[in-house]
Image (cartoon, rainbow, N blue to C red):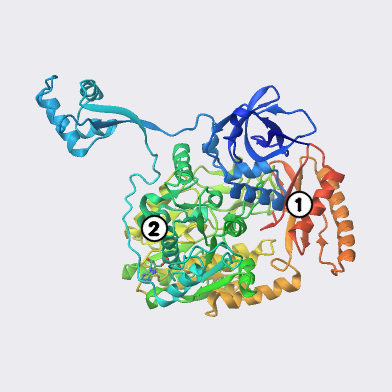
């Protein structure tokens, strides 16, 4: 039945997988919009929730009225709500969890608001001259007033500091009518105090210029013509494949500048780890105040202000990690996903969205262009470019004719035969470091681990100290001589004797950054070594501090984990050493080879970025492994991708299928196994029906239920099922049916990941 009454469906700010319908009182009907935050009655209290849809259809149950509109400016545009709905369906997640992921928590915190400070302004009195007034002023006051007139006003705190006066003095001048003092919104600027120098566009080389024209193709207004509406052709994504040091960032900057000229906004996604002030400075240097930064290290206040600057349109360029894909940029022209292959774009909790995929969908919905940039694209994006679904823009050479580094493999098997033990540094690498120290050039050493030594093993019987709650070995930390679990954070002291054989001789095998640092210092006592890993960068900007020291040439060697692999641009680095290339190769994961290649190519790309040529040494036990051999060959990414894609096609793995995981958790191992097996059996039945119905020759495949690679975490046993199918929606349909037909017990957990990036 239709009436004049308006109804609104509301997502209450709770993790309930359903919407609630309220009637809209006539007084607020005019003002109500979807995307607004409302106050509604909910189980005898007042709750907040987002208006998702309006209807005049009368529901067949009794409704309560909306109490009020909390904020008239919508938090979500209709376009963003569409995107949120798409994610909820695609990832099979409650819509509230998507809404929450799309909005910084700081914005919704009760009491969150703009910060106001007292602002002092001179009052213009007959030409601004205080003399001759009915209030005689002291010489001091006159001088102070003249100064304030000169600077034109300022924040009270600032003036007090600058002119060595007191708030009382200023208030006194205000009472006499010479000054006005009033609260004003003060921006909490995350870049305050970091000197950002303005930069000008560089002259693009031919390769960059043609990549830029592919990116802008069809996006700019023709002179003299009306803007054409967004069409399917307009929104074809562009894969920007540019080798390391090819000047991709400059291309992004110039594409964004053109969008701003057109009155459009832009979002730049960067991997969290690469979101250093160095990266932010490159954007702020070009676009100044028009840039908003969303960074996990921001304070709540900074985040609140940045988000509101985006919503009001004060900021038109947003730089941030994966969640910035939801930034409320109006009239969006461009989304850049830098290092698009980076796994940090995937959220590993509900909603398990991939920001790159969300960027592609958002751009399509809003008629914007999306650019996926990388030196080592994901095979998903590469295949899309090869098939013509994406446009491909290639920048195959470094800027200014600089050469890519020469890459050498060092077989550690040989090193071991030569020396009789396994050294951390091969003699080849040591010689190369020695050369750099002599020449005053810099070295980056990459190690994919942390901690002083990795594990503690009984030298007599081989017992390994493991966390009892998680199925991983403890990591030994030298600083406090204790064992830490990197899954649950638990710790214990090193045992005095082996619990199995009572032996007291422990070996501390494996290499950690601290041990690698100590060993290098022994070889080169004079070398100035900087170490960067999760331990050394716990503080807010210490990441940046370490990098500035290195950039300023105050250190010879930078030794670190993944955080030094990407994005860094140091002109004086001519040597990169990878201490243990194989670490990421032996993971039980279909993408292990791809990840290894990406990591090696990215870290190699840090060498020789300026005039001096670069050299890379990769220490490995597996020089024939395709990913490692390819990283050292000059055939480049395309050759590796062709080889790896052929393997994936043969094995029916992504990107030739969709791969989802179901991970079951319970504290009772028998229970979790029973349920995982039940689900696996039911899914296999579903697969049989699907395959015979579609005649698809077994394209819907279900693994056995098995212990997950991480078999136990925080006391929970974990079992896993892997499902492959031609389309995600087929997998979602199967899982939805099963969840309804066979709901798992309350004391168990099921995590469903539609596009699982790794098996864990
Ligand atoms: P990428 O992101 O592709 O690794 P960058 O954007 O970091 O490369 O560029 C590498 C270096 O080259 C930077 O120092 C950058 O300022 C410089 N650069 C980029 N484009 C040009 C150009 N057209 N002319 C001169 N230098 C450039
Ligand atoms: Zn643990
Ligand atoms: Zn033992």
Q: Nearer the viewer, residue 375 or 261?
A: 261
Q: Quadrant of the N terminus?
A: top right
Residue 369 picture location, percent across and down = 54, 62
Of badges 2 and 1, nearer the viewer stands 2
* Relative horizontal placement of residue 55, taking residue 272 as reference (left or right): right
Percent x, y for residue 452? 52, 52
The residue that appears at 64% across and 54% down in the rendered structure is: 459
Q: Which image quadrant for residue 25? A: top right
The disc at residue 100 is none
| Disc 2/disc 1 C-alpha distance (Å) | 41 Å
Q: Is residue 251 visible?
A: yes
Ligand 2 location (quadrant): top right
- Judging by the rendered image, the residue that carries numbered circle 2 is 282
Q: Earlier in the sequence, mark 2 or mark 1?
A: 2
Q: Residue furthest bottom?
A: 635
Q: Nearer the viewer, residue 352 or 434?
A: 352
Q: Residues within 10 Å of mark 1 (few under 14, many from 20)?
A: many
As helix, strand or loop, the secondary structure at mark 1 comes to: strand
Q: Quadrant of residue 685?
A: bottom right
Q: Are marks 2 and 1 in contact (CB under 8 Å)?
A: no
Decide: is 609 above or below 539. below
In this orientation, which residue lies closer to the viewer: 77 or 714?
77
Classify mark 2 as within 8 Å of ligand 1 or not, answering yes or no. yes
Q: Is residue 673 visible?
A: no
Tally of marks: 2
**Residue at numbered disc 1:** 662
- Relative placement, left or right, of 212 versus 709 is left
């Amino acid at each position: 039945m239709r009436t004049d009454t308006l109804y609104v469906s509301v997502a209450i700010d709770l993790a309930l997988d359903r919407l609630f319908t309220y009637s809209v009182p006539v007084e607020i009907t005019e003002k109500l919009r979807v995307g607004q935050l409302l106050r509604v009655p909910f189980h005898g209290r007042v709750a907040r929730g987002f208006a998702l849809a309006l209807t005049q259809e009368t529901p067949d149950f009794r409704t309560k009225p909306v109490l009020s509109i909390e904020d008239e400016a919508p938090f979500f545009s209709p376009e963003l709500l569409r995107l949120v709905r798409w994610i909820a369906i695609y990832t099979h997640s409650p819509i509230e969890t998507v809404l929450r992921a799309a909005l910084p928590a700081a914005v919704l915190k009760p009491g969150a608001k703009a910060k106001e400070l007292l602002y002092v302004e001179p009052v213009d009195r007959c030409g601004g001259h205080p003399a001759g007034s009915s209030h005689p002023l002291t010489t001091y006051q006159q001088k102070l007033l003249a100064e304030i007139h000169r600077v034109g006003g300022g924040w009270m705190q600032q003036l007090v500091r600058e002119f060595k006066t007191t708030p009382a003095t200023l208030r006194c001048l205000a009472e006499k009518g010479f000054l006005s003092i009033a609260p004003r919104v003060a921006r909490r600027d995350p870049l305050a105090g970091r000197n950002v120098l303005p930069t000008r566009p560089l002259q693009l080389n031919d390769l960059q210029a043609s990549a830029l024209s592919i990116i802008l193709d069809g996006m700019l207004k023709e002179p003299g013509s009306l803007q054409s509406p967004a069409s399917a052709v307009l929104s074809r994504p562009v894969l920007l494949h540019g080798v390391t040091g090819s000047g991709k960032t400059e291309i992004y900057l110039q594409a964004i500048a053109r969008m701003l000229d057109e009155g459009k906004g832009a979002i730049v996604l960067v991997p969290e780890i690469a979101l250093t002030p160095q990266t932010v400075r490159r954007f702020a240097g070009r676009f100044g105040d028009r840039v908003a930064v969303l960074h996990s290290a921001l304070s709540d206040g900074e985040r609140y202000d940045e988000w509101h600057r985006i919503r009001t349109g004060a900021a038109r360029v947003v730089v941030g990690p994966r969640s910035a894909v939801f930034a409320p940029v109006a009239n969006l022209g461009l989304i850049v996903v830098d290092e698009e292959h980076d796994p940090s774009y995937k959220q590993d909790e509900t909603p398990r969205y991939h920001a790159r995929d969300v960027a592609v969908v958002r751009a399509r919905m809003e008629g914007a262009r999306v650019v996926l940039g990388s030196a080592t694209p994901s095979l998903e994006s590469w295949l899309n470019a090869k098939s013509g679904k994406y446009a491909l823009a290639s920048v195959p050479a470094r800027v200014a004719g600089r050469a890519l580094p020469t890459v050498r493999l060092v077989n550690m098997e040989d090193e071991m035969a030569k020396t009789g033990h396994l050294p951390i540094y091969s003699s080849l690498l040591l010689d190369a470091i020695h050369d750099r120290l002599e020449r005053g050039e810099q070295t980056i050493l990459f190690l994919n681990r942390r901690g002083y030594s990795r594990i503690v093993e009984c030298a007599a019987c081989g017992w390994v100290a493991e966390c009892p709650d998680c199925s991983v070995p403890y990591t030994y930390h030298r600083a406090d001589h204790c064992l830490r679990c990197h899954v649950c954070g638990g710790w214990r002291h090193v045992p005095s004797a082996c619990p199995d054989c009572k032996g007291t001789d422990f070996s501390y095998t494996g290499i950690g950054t601290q041990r690698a640092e100590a060993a290098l210092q022994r070889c080169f006592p004079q070398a100035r070594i900087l170490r960067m890993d999760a331990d050394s960068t716990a503080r807010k900007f210490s990441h940046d501090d370490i990098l500035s020291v290195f950039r300023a040439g105050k250190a010879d060697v930078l030794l670190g984990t993944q955080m030094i692999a990407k994005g860094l641009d140091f002109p004086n680095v001519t040597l990169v050493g990878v201490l243990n290339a194989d670490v990421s190769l032996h993971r039980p994961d279909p993408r292990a080879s791809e990840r290894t290649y990406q990591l090696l190519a990215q870290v190699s790309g840090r060498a020789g970025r300026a005039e001096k040529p670069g050299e890379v040494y990769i220490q490995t036990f597996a020089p024939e492994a395709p990913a490692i051999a390819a990283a050292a060959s000059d055939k480049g990414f395309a050759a590796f991708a062709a080889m790896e894609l052929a393997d994936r096609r043969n094995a029916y793995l992504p990107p030739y299928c969709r791969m989802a995981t179901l991970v079951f958790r319970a504290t009772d191992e028998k229970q979790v196994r029973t349920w995982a097996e039940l689900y696996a059996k039911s899914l296999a039945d579903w697969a049989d029906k699907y395959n015979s119905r579609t005649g698809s020759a077994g394209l819907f495949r279900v693994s056995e239920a098995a212990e997950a690679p991480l078999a136990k975490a925080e006391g929970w046993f974990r079992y896993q099922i892997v499902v492959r199918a031609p389309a995600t929606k087929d997998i979602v349909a199967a899982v939805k049916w099963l969840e309804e037909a066979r709901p798992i017990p309350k004391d168990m957990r099921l995590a469903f990941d539609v596009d699982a990036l790794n098996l864990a």
